[in-house]
Image (cartoon, rainbow, N blue to C red):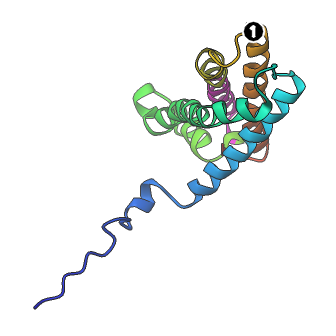
Amino acid sequence: MKEIRLNNIIFPIWFLLFFPPVILITLAGNFIIDSLVILACFKIFKIVDSQHNIKYYYKKSIIRVWLYGFLADFIGATILFILGILGDSFGLSNELMYGINYDPFSNLLAVIIIIFAILISGLFIFIFNYRVVFKELIKDSYCRFKLALTIAIIKCHGPFYCLQSGFIID
């Protein structure tokens, strides 16, 4: 009887093209950063009531903050991807597309476009956290506003460091 081998059916090697191993580091890093930011904000803004502690709020929100953060990052990255790949269709110069894709400081407009995409991601982080994640969990709208805004500002601050060093990574 002939031996049948099913190599890499569960994890095919081509999957690495679409889901590189470095994404696991990014996922873990973002989870840790989101956790630290949320816990610090809960502490600073005193988001505790007589019925629930910080642990309760953390458990109820961290996964959604983390996932919506990736959705917001994806929205910003999509803007850059579309302009970087389909820039010819929009009449963008090769220098600008090179700046968007590889070297932001080679073109001032590339820096502006990248900053715009980062700010769009930050806006979505704020909207998702304010209107979805914390809407039912934190009833005080001003407290929810401060929390969502702080998370958005801190989460968008990281890409600016990467932009300063010439790398666009979120």
* Residue in the image at 57% along x and 36% along y: 67
Q: Quadrant of the C terminus?
A: top right
Amino acid type of the residue tagged 1 in the rendering? Asp
Question: As rendered, which of 136 and 13 lies closer to the eye?
Answer: 136
Residue 69, placed above or below residue 23: above
Q: Is residue 104 above or below residue 10?
A: above
Q: Report which residue position mark 1 lands on.
A: 140
Residue 116 magenta-drawn? Answer: yes
Question: What is the residue that sits farthest to the right in this orientation?
Answer: 44
- In magenta stretch: residue 147: no
**Label 1 element class:** loop
In percent of width and height, residue 78 lies at 50, 33
Task: Classify mark 1: residues with Cα within 10 Å, few (<14), some (14-19) or many (20+).
Answer: few
User: Magenta region: which residues?
Assistant: 106-122
| Outermost residue to the left | 1
The image quarter in which residue 63 lies: top right
